[in-house]
Image (cartoon, coloured by chain):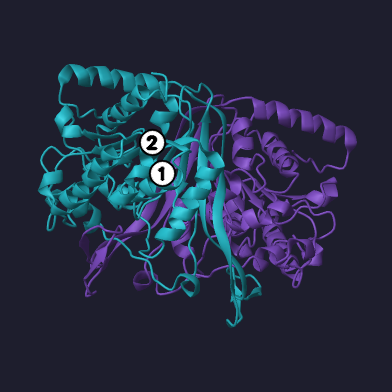
Chain colours: A purple, B cyan
Amino acid sequence: MRATGSGFLAGAMTLAWMTVASAAEPIQLRDMGSFHVGGRIVELTGQPVRDIVRVPGGPTSKLDPNGRYQVEHMYAQYFLVQNKKARYPILMWHGGGLTGATYETTPDGREGWRDMFIRKGWDVYVTDAVERGRSGFASPDIWNAPPLFLTQTDPWERFRIGPGPGSFDADPAKRKLLPGNQFPVEAFDAFTKQIVPRWLSTDDAVLQAYLALIDKVCPCVILAHSQGGFFGFRAAEARPDKVKALVAVEPASAGPAKGAASLKNVPVLTVFGDYIEQDPRWVAYSKNVLAYLAALKAAGGSGDVIDLPKLGIKGNSHMLMMDRNNRDVADQIQKWLVGRGLVEP
Amino acid sequence: MRATGSGFLAGAMTLAWMTVASAAEPIQLRDMGSFHVGGRIVELTGQPVRDIVRVPGGPTSKLDPNGRYQVEHMYAQYFLVQNKKARYPILMWHGGGLTGATYETTPDGREGWRDMFIRKGWDVYVTDAVERGRSGFASPDIWNAPPLFLTQTDPWERFRIGPGPGSFDADPAKRKLLPGNQFPVEAFDAFTKQIVPRWLSTDDAVLQAYLALIDKVCPCVILAHSQGGFFGFRAAEARPDKVKALVAVEPASAGPAKGAASLKNVPVLTVFGDYIEQDPRWVAYSKNVLAYLAALKAAGGSGDVIDLPKLGIKGNSHMLMMDRNNRDVADQIQKWLVGRGLVEP
């Protein structure tokens, strides 16, 4: 069952038909695989050695924590499409407390943006930022800080699914929802299985690994969500020759406007969903982003904004790529990329 | 550059040609995607609330650690082949301190077992066990134990790459290697980027999530490596009707032999690489596994062993799926599966 959420009946019927047709076609890849990039070696000394049993009933073996550790590298998984229509690959960067799973199948089992963009002719790279998922994390002896763990309440109330504080309840029937919300709430518990712990102290390491990825696989287009948007702007400022476009999907921050001039030759698109004005935190986030884009325009650059409700695409939570109308949002991004000559329609 | 490592010149030349040919053919999938299975909800109370800044320059927001947490679920990624030749899907379970990346591209950039088995006509499911990779991990308030972190020394000396204690060195030129070893040592540092922290206290949770996966996607064949082998035997004992074959690749333990009779109708294959007798820990591991297989045979079951050096396939480390001759080892496993009627040749 695939919901369209467009609100226009004729458009909805066409889209539903297209969805079924594309899902029936095989995905053809000329290659796929994964690798890790970046990181550094840290050496620990003076730690006590101990004996451990690694599998039940097995022999003891020494665990010597002294020695060299690989830390702060990043995992990237790639899917290279057989019938390429895009000039460059697209890199999909997830938000805080999440992994690359963000862009895969939606929590309720529909197609996600990874496969939609592969089907649109893009080579796609999906990463797990440093500290998350298949990138692993460093010991407290190296990072000197514990991670944060998010409750189920946190994304329900902060990701514009429910109307802010007090809207989550343990009982799904009692959870309050923003009216018209497109998040697949019946799969909210499944979504919270995608949440992983996060640190507040690793921003530099995260950025360095993203730059290592850019140096390996770009020129490219970067599509970055939420906290990933912050890194997307920083990475594009540091590598404006290699980032051919930046699509910031609800960036939690664009960072200080003083860096904007570096992007004067990089087309930038930001995409916002619904209910922004009802959430003071999102008002603050979008204000920062709009100030950055104003500085970019003043420097001679181009900073476009897609405000989805203004296009009649309503009800989007912060997790646009999982919302029932995720295909409509992907199509808007694709249209912008076509307009920039980055992919054939 | 793809090394064959067979040591027989004619065989090596044929294999090199086949490798190039298959890499040039597109991978055709009727679908791919991911999901999480299993897990439970834990509620924490009485924790202090604090204000945090989630992105630099952003507004403060409350982090309230009181509430419901999703924990002990497992991430699974699937690749469903267009031209299916196998009767059931194959589930690939990784070893301790690792993730599903084990089965993807090798650390030196060659094709891994995931894609080799897809090309052989299998639907493939690759998981990250509970606590690792995209499965995330629970807070110390829930698990009450810290994870272990592995140095680079640990796998070099324990995975039969170097000849045991003292064989690793920070300087790659000074690392001692078991003679004829097939591990791609030039990519050893890249391999250590795949290592993630592990716990010694989560075995029950890991097994429960594997059972949830079996209940969702089986009947199936399970291919499990190292610590994963321990879970493979436990899971097959618990679901002998759904596990149509178990391929245990260097299982670190088969567990207590008393459970073996449960598997009397499940074909079991164990695969061992080289140098086992030179490492007391591996002698102990294989002794446990052989005792289990003897009990299985006594109960009327079938427990086959592939001892690779006896077939002339030499130099395999513990990480067989990454070794230079990983294709030869995959072909031996496929041959056994063909012999059991589980896949067309």
Chain letter belonging to callout 1: B
What amino acid type is highlighted by mark number 2? Val
Instruction: Return the residue at label 1.
Output: B236
Q: Secondary structure at mark 1?
A: helix
The residue at the point 74 percent across, 61 percent down is A172
Q: Secondary structure at mark 2?
A: loop
Instruction: Return the residue at label 2.
Output: B266
Quadrant occupied by the C terminus of chain B: top left
Q: Which of B231/A230 is in front? A: B231
- In-image side of A222 versus A206 (left or right): right
Q: Residue furthest front?
A: B299
- In-image side of B304 versus A335 (left or right): left
| Vertical placement of residue A162 versus A47, above or below | above
What amino acid type is highlighted by mark number 1? Ala
Chain letter belonging to callout 2: B
Q: Are marks 2 and 1 in contact (CB under 8 Å)?
A: yes
Asked if residue A261 shows in the view, the reply is yes
Quadrant occupied by the N terminus of chain B: top left
Distance from the alpha carbon under mark 2 to that under mark 1: 8 Å
The residue at the point 74 percent across, 38 percent down is A2
| Vertical placement of residue B328 versus A178, above or below | above
Q: Which of B40/A199 is in front? A: B40
Residue A28: which quarter of the image?
Answer: top right
Answer few, some or many: residues within 10 Å of disc 2's Cα (few below 14, many 20 plus, some between 14 and 19).
many
Q: Counting residues from the N terminus, which is met first, the one under dot 2 or under dot 1?
A: 1
Residue A18: which quarter of the image?
Answer: top right
Please state the horizontal and vertical placement of residue A243, each as a whole percent of the image: 54, 45
Q: Which mark is residue A59?
A: none
Please state the horizontal and vertical placement of residue A104, each as a whole percent of the image: 59, 44
The residue at the point 76 percent across, 52 percent down is A316
Please state the horizontal and vertical placement of residue A119, each as a whole percent of the image: 62, 31
